């Protein structure tokens, strides 16, 4: 049993209780490597998403500054690895691609930053998720973390809705790399927002 498996066994039920996590669409999570893309409202979103993944480890890119804080052990235990947001971090990008190609799940928040209490359709998105999909040719699993007031909080119900995977072939890569990344990221984030609307995010 790996370190992550031990951590997950000990803490997943605890996290599910304090965040009152309900998972919808767990059957949509593929067995192999994939990109898991979700909305972002709270620092605790990776914890909630990991607890909802049915025991599979979800890897995350996290800003390098967090690895020099008291939270570093927890961040590493969750499978996170550092990225330099100030520039083009080729090493982190290659590492992300390797994880997916090796059959692991990589979690990405297309918004890039947390937007608590905000309608996700009004927030900007980054093109990084499109770039990762382009390089790995992996399927993307859209996920929406739905909750009252669009904020992930303890002791409030948080519903993790896992949508059907979007295959690589579904994206339009014409018009050049940058245009393709941008278009793919938009399709992915629209799918996340559709999951939010299906259950009325912000009304539970």
Image (tube, rainbow, N blue to C red):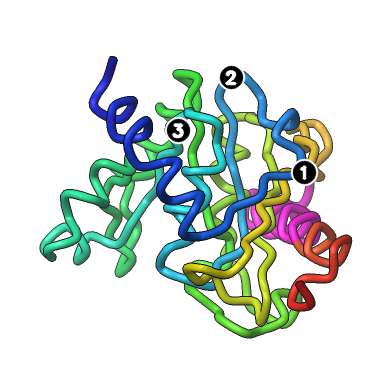
Choose mark 1 or mark 3, whichever is in front. 1
Label whose residue precedes the other's in the sequence (1 or 3): 3
**Residue sitting at x 50%, y 49%:** 16
Give residue 148's position: percent from left, percent from top. Answer: 68, 76
Image quadrant occupied by the C terminus: bottom right
Magenta segment boundaries in residue numbering: 174-192
**Residue sitting at x 51%, y 32%:** 105
Q: Residues within 10 Å of mark 3 (few under 14, many from 20)?
A: many
Residues at marks 2 and 3, CA–CA distance in whole angstroms: 14 Å
Check the image and report above or below for 148 versus 143: below
Give residue 189's position: percent from left, percent from top. Answer: 72, 60
Please tell me the numbered disc located at residue 32.
2
Asked if disc 1 and disc 3 are in contact, CB closer than 8 Å, the reply is no
Give the residue number, with chain letter if any, for mark 3: 97
Give the residue number, with chain letter if any, for mark 1: 163
Q: Residues within 10 Å of mark 1 (few under 14, many from 20)?
A: many
Label whose residue precedes the other's in the sequence (2 or 3): 2
Choose mark 1 or mark 2, whichever is in front. 1
């Amino acid at each position: 049993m790996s370190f992550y498996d031990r951590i997950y066994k000990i803490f997943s039920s605890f996290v599910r209780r304090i965040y009152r996590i309900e998972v919808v669409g767990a059957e949509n999570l593929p067995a192999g490597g994939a990109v898991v893309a979700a909305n972002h409202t709270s620092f605790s979103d990776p914890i909630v998403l990991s607890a909802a993944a049915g025991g599979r480890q979800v890897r995350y890119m996290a800003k390098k500054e967090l690895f020099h804080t008291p939270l570093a052990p927890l961040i590493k235990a969750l499978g996170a690895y550092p990225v330099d947001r100030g520039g083009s971090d080729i090493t982190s990008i290659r590492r992300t691609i390797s994880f997916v190609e090796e059959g692991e799940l990589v979690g990405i928040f297309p918004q890039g930053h947390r937007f608590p209490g905000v309608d996700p359709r009004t927030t900007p998105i980054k093109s990084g998720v499109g770039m990762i999909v382009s390089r790995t040719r992996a399927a993307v699993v859209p996920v929406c973390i739905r909750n009252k007031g669009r904020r992930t909080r303890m002791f409030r119900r948080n519903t993790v809705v896992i949508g059907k995977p979007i295959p690589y072939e579904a994206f339009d890569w014409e018009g050049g790399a940058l245009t393709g990344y941008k278009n793919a990221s938009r399709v992915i984030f629209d799918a996340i927002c559709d999951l939010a609307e299906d259950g009325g995010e912000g009304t539970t």
